[in-house]
Image (cartoon, grey):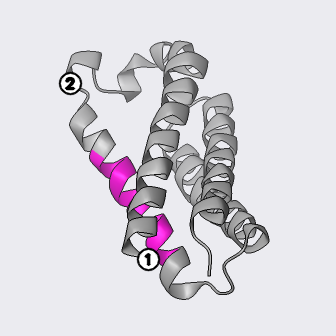
Amino acid sequence: MLKKVGLASLAIFITWSVLDFVIHELMLKSSYLSQPQLWRPEAEIKMWLISLVVFVSAVCFVYVYVQFISPKSMNVAVKYGLIFGIGAGMSFAYGTYAVQPVHYGIALTWFLGTVIQATIAGVLLGLLVKD
């Protein structure tokens, strides 16, 4: 099972990293640039920390599924990803929107992006981690 956990964590880490690039660099970059007072200058962004956060999040996402969810099936894994995404997306996107003056479009994209990323991670779990 450890091999499956490692493989699933790595697959989700890579997937989330690619999707983060699409969301933040391709879709939202112009929105971020329109509100520079809210963000660190590009030279001060801590990419190593972002990668660590994504990696630890992927490992925790997989660990919760492996340790606490049964039965393990594609249907259950996708539902887990969807529910996780809704909860995390609401907390991150709309929690930030409530206290920081970001454009609503940024918050909505963060929310939808998180739901999509977690649902895709659920599909990966369904493919890689089975009873």
- The residue located at (57%, 44%) in the rendering is 97
x and y, in percent, of residue 24 in the image: 51, 27
Image: magenta residue range: 52-64
- The residue located at (44%, 77%) in the rendering is 1
Query: Is residue 23 rendered magenta in the image?
Result: no
Q: Earlier in the sequence, mark 1 or mark 2?
A: 1
x and y, in percent, of residue 53 in the image: 33, 50
- Tag shown at residue 1: 1
Query: Is residue 62 rendered magenta in the image?
Result: yes
Amino acid tagged 2:
Glu
Q: Is residue 67 visible from the viewing direction of this image?
A: yes
> Residue 98 versus residue 78: which sits nearer the camera?
78
Image quadrant where one finds the C terminus: bottom right
Disc 1/disc 2 C-alpha distance (Å): 39 Å
Residue of label 2: 44
x and y, in percent, of residue 26 in the image: 56, 17
